[in-house]
Image (spheres, rainbow, N blue to C red):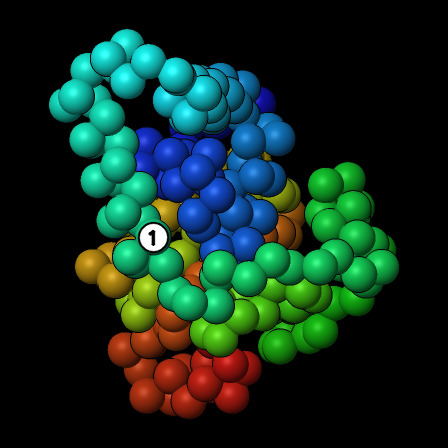
């Protein structure tokens, strides 16, 4: 398996610092389980952060490095929605769902059919305001309408693949879309595409009909 698409360095840093919303962190964590490259980066970020916290001699770290770290931390804390600062308590349903995701055993998922081509499963325990995490299963040939996002969207592919802006995203690949991105996705190949998706904002399809449908689903 060759993974070609990875989280940005800022996202990996936020994951290491614990400032991502739990739903977004879930997607990053699933990517890390499959990606040695990003796991090494995460371990390095964590080690650097720990060293800074444990340093007793302030002169051991250059002032400019310390200031950059502090500034980055302030920016992340300021940008965090208030509801992401609470700790999520795992229930039995949460544990069962995340276990099925990690095993990639999608037969154990209680799918809800949205159309002939799309099914979803709302991952329990991750709903906070407009932030959510869901599994989607798209049948081959599915085309998602052109849309943009009001917040950040993280995607990791667990099965199959899809095309987005001339790039192909397959198992293990990570997509990171912010409000500046306008895109249309299509599922390629002969097998369904299963993706774990989290977002902290609404999806805005260009089509009014699709926009109404997405609002009905709460996304």
Q: Nearer the viewer, residue 103 or 42?
A: 42
Residue 2, position as x, y percentages in the image: 50, 22
Farthest residue, direction top: 60
**Is residue 65 at all visible to an observer of this figure?**
yes
Marker count (numbered)? 1
Farthest residue, direction left: 64
Residue 66, position as x, y percentages in the image: 23, 26
Residue 193, position as x, y percentages in the image: 59, 51
Q: Nearer the viewer, residue 59 or 145?
A: 59
SS for callout 1: helix
Direction from residue 14 to residue 160 in the image, left or right? right
Q: Nearer the viewer, residue 207 or 172?
A: 172
Q: Nearer the viewer, residue 38 or 84?
A: 84
Direction from residue 60 to residue 47 in the image, left or right? right
What residue sits right under mark 1 in the picture?
77
**Is residue 197 at all visible to an observer of this figure?**
no
Q: Looking at the image, which residue is at 31% across and 82% down?
A: 207
Residue 82, position as x, y percentages in the image: 42, 67
Work out which quarter of the rendered image holds the N terminus and state it: top right
Q: Is residue 93 above or below residue 95?
A: below
Q: Looking at the image, which residue is at 71% across and 73% down?
A: 112
Q: Looking at the image, which residue is at 32% across and 88% down?
A: 208
Direction from residue 64 to residue 195 in the image, left or right? right
Q: Quadrant of residue 150?
A: bottom left
């Amino acid at each position: 398996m060759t993974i070609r698409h990875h989280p940005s360095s800022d996202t990996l840093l936020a994951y290491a610092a614990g400032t991502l919303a739990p739903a977004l962190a879930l997607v990053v964590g699933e990517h890390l389980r499959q990606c040695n490259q990003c796991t090494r980066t995460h371990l390095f970020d964590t080690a650097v952060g720990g060293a800074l916290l444990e340093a007793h001699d302030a002169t051991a770290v250059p002032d400019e490095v310390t200031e950059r770290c502090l500034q980055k931390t302030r920016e992340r804390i300021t940008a965090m929605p208030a509801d992401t600062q609470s700790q999520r308590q795992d229930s039995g349903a949460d544990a069962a769902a995340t276990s099925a995701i990690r095993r990639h055993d999608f037969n154990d998922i209680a799918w809800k059919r949205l159309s002939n081509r799309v099914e979803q499963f709302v991952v329990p325990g991750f709903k906070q305001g407009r932030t959510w995490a869901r599994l989607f299963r798209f049948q081959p040939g599915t085309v998602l309408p052109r849309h943009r996002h009001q917040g950040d969207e993280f995607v990791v592919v667990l099965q199959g693949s899809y095309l987005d802006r001339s790039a192909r995203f397959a198992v293990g690949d990570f997509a990171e879309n912010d409000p500046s991105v306008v895109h249309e996705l299509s599922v390629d190949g002969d097998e369904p595409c299963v993706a774990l998706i989290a977002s902290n904002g609404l999806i805005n399809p260009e089509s009014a009909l699709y926009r109404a449908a997405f609002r009905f689903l709460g996304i």
